[in-house]
Amino acid sequence: MAKKEQTYKQALAEAEKILEQIESNELDVDQMADAVKKALELLAFCKNKLRATEEDIEKLMSE
């Protein structure tokens, strides 16, 4: 079965959960680096998704 593509909403929710874990000191030092890396990947995904959506909307508006 093919993996379902992650949505903006899912990525943002996961990033927020990671940030909450970091802020509440739920993670130990060993988990911290991996959590920060994952949060940055999720935020980059969200940023790219927003940029692509903005470009699509601008293209539609100019037609």
Image (cartoon, helix red, strand yellow):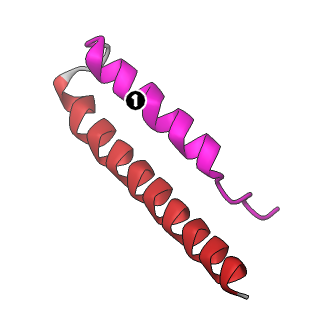
The answer to whether 63 is drawn above or below residue 50 in the figure is: below
Name the quadrant of the N terminus. bottom right
User: Where does residue 54 sit, x and y in percent of width and height?
Assistant: 56, 68
Which residue lies at the image location 65% right of the left edge and 71% below the top edge?
57
Question: Per the image, is 39 magenta?
Answer: no
Which residue lies at the image location 53% right of the left edge and 60% below the top edge?
50
Which residue lies at the image location 44% right of the left edge and 50% below the top edge?
42
- In the visual, does 42 lie left or right of 52? left
- In the visual, does 15 lie left or right of 49? left
Which range of residues does the magenta coloring cover? 1-25
User: Where does residue 13 sit, x and y in percent of width and height?
Assistant: 55, 34
- In the visual, does 52 lie left or right of 1? left
Q: Secondary structure at mark 1?
A: helix
Q: Residues within 10 Å of mark 1 (few under 14, many from 20)?
A: some
The answer to whether 53 is drawn above or below residue 42 in the figure is: below
Asked where in the image residue 22 lies, by quadrant, the reply is top left
Q: Which residue is mark 1?
A: 18
Which residue lies at the image location 74% right of the left edge and 57% below the top edge?
4
Query: Furthest residue to the front?
Result: 62
Question: Please, what is the dominant secondary structure of the magenta stretch?
Answer: helix
User: Where does residue 25 sit, x and y in percent of width and height?
Assistant: 25, 13
- Give amino acid for label 1: Ile
- In the visual, does 6 lie left or right of 16? right
